[in-house]
Amino acid sequence: MDKILVHGGRRLRGSVKISGSKNSALPILAATLLTKEPCTISRVPDLSDIHYMLTILSELGCEVERASGTVQIRAEKILTHAPYDIVRKMRASVCILGPLLGREHEATVSLPGGCVIGDRPIDLHLRGFEALGAAVKVSGGNVKVLAPHLKGARISLRSNFGSTVLGTGNVMMAAVLAEGVTVIDGAAEEPEVVDLANFLIAMGAKIEGAGTRSITIEGVKELHGAEHEVIPDRIEAGTFLAAGAISGDEVTVSRVIPAHLESVTGLLSKAGFEILSNGSQVTIRPGSKRVALKIDAVPYPGFPTDMQAQMCALMATTEGISVVSDHVFPHRFMHVAEMKRMGADIELQGGTAVIKGVSQLGGAPVMASDLRASAALVLAGLQADGITEVNRVYHIDRGYESIDEKLNELGAEIERVKA
C-alpha cells in the first residue's frame, strides 16, 4: 500500500492542467448501457474509480477499449446483475441501476461501498424508480428493481441535506426510455448533471431543464451511440487553487470552466487572495493579508462539500477564527483529528468546525479516511514544518490523477513510496 511523503515549506508556482471530471465520467460511462451502439467518451481521467467502473461494464458484457484518456464502449449484449465483488469498492457503481432499468427493465446490484463519510443512502434513487413504475426489493445486500413497463411521472428528489447528484442522474437515465413525460423536482443543479444530460441528448434523449431544480424528460423508444468530452473536474481545480492559496506565489489552473469554480474563487477572494480568470484559466496570487472565513458547504451553486476539507487546511494557518459548516455531509470531518496531530487548533461542534488559525503546522504521520480528506492532508503537509506522511493514499487515487506529480511540477517536494 502506497503512502505519500510531503516535504513542507516549498513554494508553488506555475500552471497545472486539470483532468476530466470523475463525478461526470462515472455516470456518463454507465449511460453507455442505454444503447447497443458504440459510444466514445474522451477526457476520461485515469483514476481507480474509473477503472472499477470499466471493470463493472466489462463484467456486464460490454466491449471496452481504453487509450490515452479516450474510452470506447459497446454494450450490445449485457447482463443485468452486478455482483458484490465488483461494486463493493465504489459507491458510484449504483448509477448502473438507472440505465439497466431503462433498457432491460430490470437490474440487480449489490449495495455499494466507497468513502466512509457518513450515511449516504440510496433511498431517493429507489423512490424515483418506484415512481416510474418499478418494483424495488432490498434483500441479502442486493437491490433489485423490476419494471415490465416504465411510465413517466412527477418525481421529487428533495431531502433534508439537499439534492442527490447521483440520484438525479440515475432517475434521469431510467426515465429517458420510459413512456411519456417525467418531471424531476428538487433535481441537483451540479454541472455534472448537466454534462450527463448533454451526453444523453447526444444519444437522442429529450431533456430540458438540466442545471435547474426541475428537469423534464420526454421518453423515447431507443437511444443511439454518441461521442462526448467530459467536462473539467471543478473539485480538482479547486484543490489546486487551495494549494496555491496555502503555499503558492502564483498558481494557474488551466483547461477549466471558471463559471463552475465561482463559489470557490469567491471565497478565496474573500480570504484575501487575488483571483484572475482568463478564458479557460484561473490564477491565484497572494494578497496583502489572509482573512479568516465563515464557510457553509451546501449544494451547487453554493460552496461544494467536496472542497470543505481543503478549506479547513487553508484556514488552519489563517490568523483569526474560521467557522466551517457542512450542510450536505455533516459528519465529513474525519480530517480534523489528523490535522490536530499536525498542530491545528480545531474544535468540532456537530457538523461545524471552529478553527483558530496557528502560525505553523508540523509534519506528522496521518491517516487518510476518504478521498477529499486525503487531499486536504496533502495540502496541510505543504505548509507544515518537516515531513508529513499521508497513509492510505488509495483514497486520493480514487479522485485525483497524479496529484503528487502535478504538485511536484509546481515546485512541491512529494514522494510516493511503498508502505
Image: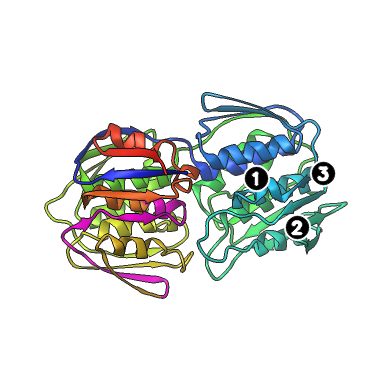
Residue wearing tag 3: 104
1 vs 2, front mark: 2
Identify which amino acid the numbered label 2 is placed on: Asn
Q: CA distance from mark 3 to mark 1?
A: 21 Å
Q: Which residues are magenta?
A: 350-375
Which secondary structure, mark 2?
strand
- Residue, far right: 148
Asked whether 76 or 65 is in front, the reply is 65
Label number found at residue 133: none
Secondary structure of the residue carrying numbered label 1:
strand
Give the side of residue 60 with respect to residue 64, left or right: right
As measured in the structure, the alpha-carbon distance from the residue carrying label 3 to the one carrying label 2 is 18 Å
Q: Position of residue 129 (x, y in %)?
A: 74, 57
Tag 3 secondary structure: helix
Q: Can the viewer see residue 330 in this picture?
A: yes
First in sequence: mark 3 vs mark 2: 3
Q: Residue at x 40, y 36 (%)?
A: 18
Q: Residue 343 appears at what percent x and percent y?
A: 24, 63
Q: Is residue 186 left or right of residue 100?
A: left
Q: Residues within 10 Å of mark 1 (few under 14, many from 20)?
A: many
Q: Is residue 216 above or below residue 61?
A: below
Rendering coords of residue 232 (x, y %): 45, 38
Q: Label 1 sits on what residue type?
A: Ile
Q: Farthest left residue?
A: 288
The three-letter amino acid code for the residue at tag 3 is: Glu
Q: Is residue 247 left or right of residue 240?
A: left
